[in-house]
Amino acid sequence: MHQKATKEELGEVIIDVIEGEDAGDFKALACEKTLERIKELGKRGFDYSDIAILVRGNADGKLIANYLTNNGCPVFTSDGLILGNSHEGKLLHAAFKMYLNPEDKTSRFALAHSLVRQNKVPSEEGFILEKSTASFGVSALLKHFPKASQLLRPADSLFDFAVRAFDIFGYLDTPNASVDAALDAVYEYQNREGTFANLPIWWKEEAVNKPIQTHANASAIRVMTVHKCKGLEFEHVIVPFDINYKKDSSEHWLEFPYHDELERMPVSFTKENLDLFEKDHALELETKSRFDWMNMVYVALTRPVCGLHIMLKEAKKPTNLSKAVFDHLGIEGAAGQYIIGQEVMPKDKKEAKAESDRILPKTTIGAAKLKMALSAPKNWQEGGIDPRKWGTAIHRILQGPKEKRRQSLERLYRSGAFSIALSERAHHVLDQIGAHKALSLLDKKNASVYTERSLVNGEHFYRPDLIIELEQQLIVIDYKTGVPKEKDQQQLNEYINLLSARFENVEGELLYI
């Protein structure tokens, strides 16, 4: 609080003292206030990337990241938000295990427990739901989740089952970074020829450690724990949830004179065990905890360059940080806003425009609203896209099995890579190409198909998109984007000439997508 300024004495500290009935109420109000502050900074001309949100732990990081994402703000977290630690990930893992063995009571309980922890049911009914689900399975879920009867029905694919599971329990109604990470993991595993039978093992070994990321593009709000921000600086820092003091409760080896064979034993430094510690040792541990907390507060409050924004609990239920700030400022800590210093405008930004009021696009899959790409190209909603991205995406879909092409398009749509206009356009392209005479040969019983196989001619390598081998014919197909060009036909001719040296009756087709 008494750190000397090392730069120009410009900058502001804005303290919002919030009146909340309990911790949950305080955090909900703090989330709203954080969004309000981000919009204000946007109107001044600051970018999303100028803002960092610092939290004490991962649970708070996930809370604020999901809230901001749901309200159209791009968020990036490099912190330890791990899929295996999220309740969404645990729920999906339990659902897959139940699908394989509906009588598995451990999986039943794990699924119900995830729903309870996510406040999907009233808190007073949580224990009853966990117990009844463990005992009776899916039927116990119907009271709160009428679509739960669909959970164990046969699924066409791993991805379809995962989407169904999240839809049944209402996780697709709003954007959720953990849900997206879980679906991404399942989709990747499915494309590696993964199966239902092996998914629980794979999940435990690999997917459980998948980091939950939102958008790593430059213009995104950074959310991280205080521990990870050491040595970093940001134009504006928001501390939304206080930095509460927690006493070190780790175990310490103490002399134990009450047993002949146990000279020492590990004891946690808690209030209940305080009498087991010598006074000097207890004071030393208490002092260390205090200094660790003070260091954490110091790190958090000294990261901003232009502005520090803190949300604190009112004086009726103050925390250690609240008391320290109120005492330093000489205020009583009543609910309201306290502003110190001068407002700073963004530097080196010409004609900065407010971006905070823009509403980022959302779309629907059925009744499910999902977030779309925050790094989308210009005119994305109208169907505009980088031609290279369009070509690459369609190209990859066409390389995959025919029966999975629709699903691949759905994945691009859900993830935000394709808008609804682009998705409709892609469906039309696939229908047109699928009706093409050359591609109809793919359905022939004795057809052999090769995708992106390398052809070597001396020092030169060629890579046609598709080769269809029949008993007395070889068809080379190359996909292209844009308007037809002479060099496209020249490239196709090179493929045909090279293959004709080894095969008879080689033909070629150019398909524009």
Image: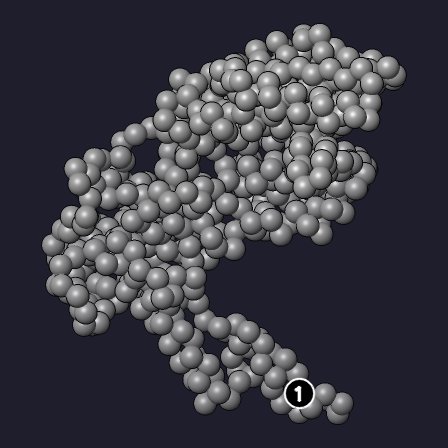
Q: Report the amino acid beneath label 1.
A: Arg
Residue drawn 24% across and 44% down?
A: 46
Q: Is 282 drawn above or below residue 302 in the view shown?
A: below
Residue position for label 1: 264
Task: Say if residue 150 shows up in the picture.
Answer: no
Q: Nearer the viewer, residue 102 or 218?
A: 218
Q: Position of residue 87 (x, y in %)?
A: 58, 44
Task: Say if residue 256 shows up in the picture.
Answer: yes
Q: Is residue 382 left or right of residue 87?
A: left
User: Quadrant of residue 467 in the image?
Assistant: top right
Q: Position of residue 78 (x, y in %)?
A: 47, 53
Q: Position of residue 502 (x, y in %)?
A: 82, 26
Q: How is the image coloured?
A: one colour
Residue drawn 71% across and 35% down?
A: 457
Q: Residues within 10 Å of mark 1 (few under 14, many from 20)?
A: some
User: Quadrant of residue 231 in the image?
Assistant: bottom left
User: Quadrant of residue 253 in the image?
Assistant: bottom right
Residue drawn 66% across and 15% down?
A: 509
